Image: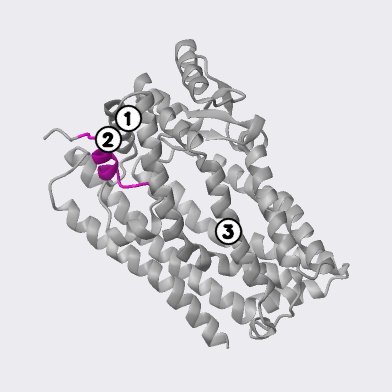
Amino acid sequence: MFYLLAFSFIIFYTMPSIILALLQIQHVAKKMKQDPVILSSNDYIEAGKYSLAKLKLSVVQNLIEMILFLIWISNGLSLLENIFSRWEFPQNIHFLFFVLGFLLISLVISLPMNFYETMILDKKFGFSKITFGLFVKDFFKSLIMVIVIGGILVFLLIYIMENFQYWWLQGFFLVFIFAILVNVLYPILIAPIFNKFTPLDNDSLREKIEAMMQKVGFRSNGIFVMDASKRDGRLNAYFGGLGKSKRVVLFDTLLEKVSQDGLLSILGHELGHFKHKDIIKNLFTMSILLFIIFFLAGNLPQSFFEIMNISLNPGSTIVFLILIVPVISFWAMPILGYFSRRAEFRADEYGAMLTSKRCLAEALIRIVNENKAFPCSHSAYIFFYYTHPPLLKRLEALDYHMEK
């Protein structure tokens, strides 16, 4: 049974992930030898090199993830359970520490790869601006959040699992409500832990943004500029929060690199998501995925836990749930990505209506140029991973043709 579980993880997750990465590597390498599109010749080559480096890193990460999965299900989880079983705690606290121990160990194990990606690879290509001290601070902040927020959620899940027959159904509702609550609180409580948000001090731009939002019927509690440049040089903007916590967030890098008209077109795109109720649709699709995950977790046979030499209990069930989430998410992504890409086209259309097709197209090109995102991808890679359509397709939909 152990070999069946290990084989399933490798066949249905590790191998497809690596094959897709290799297809993308081959595709990018081939396209790099051809005439550049969208980017200048130098930036095109640089973006290709960065894409290849990230893809090779993803292959290494997939292999490490596979090895860790095999270690966890062979002896790792039983060893962790034995460690906590020696301590005299109430049963539910024992389960809580078991899950938190698993999460913290996983976080620490992922630290070297995160360090390499952020402090070495991204710095090499001129993206990462983060200092070593800030990287360490971010890690410990994340650690504390895992303990506090993760601890609360896990404790509540354990209580439900111990007291309800169909715990997986109540657990699903708990996590779904928790996810909505996090979305509400993120812009006002969580995001400020990592970044500084200051009200937009450009009166002219603020008035134009407010007029655009009023036209669409979008109400926010403010327009803020985030000090993204202290960590990364890439450009972005987003609408964060739900209900009364909604706010407009502009990266300071975006304000520096994109024209006012271009910025308005980008925000118009985001307002298109609001107009088409894409946030609600995303919550609905997320709820379906969560329901499937909890249904599977609630109907796992005893044999799954026997092969890992651990007892069937709330703690082990939650950990096993975390272990198989990447596999389920991987096969759900093509479906989610398909509807997400359609939503992006609709948002582009709406953003172009609020400003102009040319304005939005040029703003998207500007972002790709600044972020050095390689503009060409393998169709299979797009099918599995892309939540946004390739830029060339978006420009085509906007009737924009690149000048030769």
Give the Cα distance between marks 2 and 3.
Answer: 32 Å
Mark 3: which secondary structure? helix
Q: For the residues carrying marks 2 and 1, which lies nearer the camera in this image?
A: 2
Q: Are marks 2 and 1 in contact (CB under 8 Å)?
A: yes
Which amino acid, by three-letter code, is at mark 1?
A: Leu
Q: Earlier in the sequence, mark 2 or mark 1?
A: 1
Residue occupying image coordinates x 40% and y 37%: 347
Asked whether 118 or 183 is in front, the reply is: 183
Disc number for residue 360: 1
In the image, residue 34 sits, relative to residue 56, either above or below, namely above
Which region of the structure is painted magenta? 388-400
User: Residue 55, how many percent across, how many down?
Assistant: 35, 58
The residue wearing badge 2 is 398
Nearer the observer, 265 or 230: 265
**Around disc 3, counting alpha carbons within 10 Å, would you say few (fewer than 14), some (14 to 19), or many (20 or more)?**
few
Q: Residue furthest top?
A: 203
Kind of residue at disc 3: Ile
Image coordinates for residue 209, horizontal then vertical, percent: 47, 20
Q: Amino acid at mark 2?
A: Leu
Determine whether label 3 and label 1 are within 8 Å by CB.
no
- Looking at marks 2 and 3 on the same chain, the residue that comes earlier in the sequence is marked by 3
| Colour pattern | one colour
Mark 2 element type: loop
Instruction: Name the quadrant of the C terminus.
Output: top left
The numbered disc on residue 288 is 3
Question: Toward the viewer: 250 or 402?
Answer: 402
Measured as percent of width and height from the top left, residue 298 is found at 69, 72
Label 3 – label 1 distance at C-alpha: 33 Å
Whether residue 20 appears in this view of the structure is: yes
